[in-house]
Image (cartoon, rainbow, N blue to C red):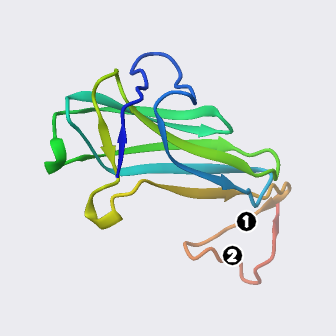
Amino acid sequence: GKSITNNMPFDGSTPRVDEGEEILSCVYAPGNNRARVKIEAIVPAVYTDTPTNAVLALFKDNSCSGATGIRLPNTGASSGHFIRLTSVIDISDMNPFALALHIGPKTNGPTLTVGDRFNEFGLPYLVITEIGYIEQTGYIYLEDLSGRLVTENYEKINLE
């Protein structure tokens, strides 16, 4: 578990990489240079000693790409809440990029505790889904739910 005291303002400003505390980081290498990457950040068990708002922010190469916040009552060690954040990033090249997840209480004073529940199954994690596409013009593709083409001979159908 990690005890977090560095605050991250719960206001109209964009979170900065020097706010809150980093609880998870990784480097991701895209497989397609014309893709979108959906990132889901899940922090399964967060609790606090004093009621506060908790702010969760996702950073791509030190720039904020998503943020959310929730209100935590004084739960103490007897319970906790999960925080979830989803962000979509457009990819324009194949260069790897850094992802970092930061969390912090709204103001100075409260302590957030993250990741000490369920024998380490309460640790934060990222689910990264890359959605690539191929652009074709002049053709129609029909697919059923299994992803197979529906045409008799599985060939392209020319647009008219």
* Amino acid type, mark 2: Leu
Which of 10/3 is in front?
Answer: 3
- Which quarter of the figure is the C terminus placed in? bottom right
- Residue 143 position in % (x across, y down): 64, 70
Who's the residue at 20% across and 30% down the image?
50
Which secondary structure lies at badge 1? loop
Which secondary structure lies at badge 2? loop
Q: Going by the image, does 41 lie left or right of 90?
A: left
> Label 2, label 1: how many angstroms apart (C-alpha)?
7 Å
Badge 1 is on which residue?
141
The image shows residue 43, relative to residue 112, as above or below, that is: below
- Residue 111 position in % (x across, y down): 29, 34
Residue count near mark 2 (Cα–Cα under 10 Å), binned few <14, some 14–19, many ≥20:
some
Q: Quadrant of residue 103?
A: top left
Which of 90/118 is in front?
Answer: 118
- Mark closest to the chain's N terminus, 2 or 1: 1
Which of 35/153 is in front?
Answer: 35
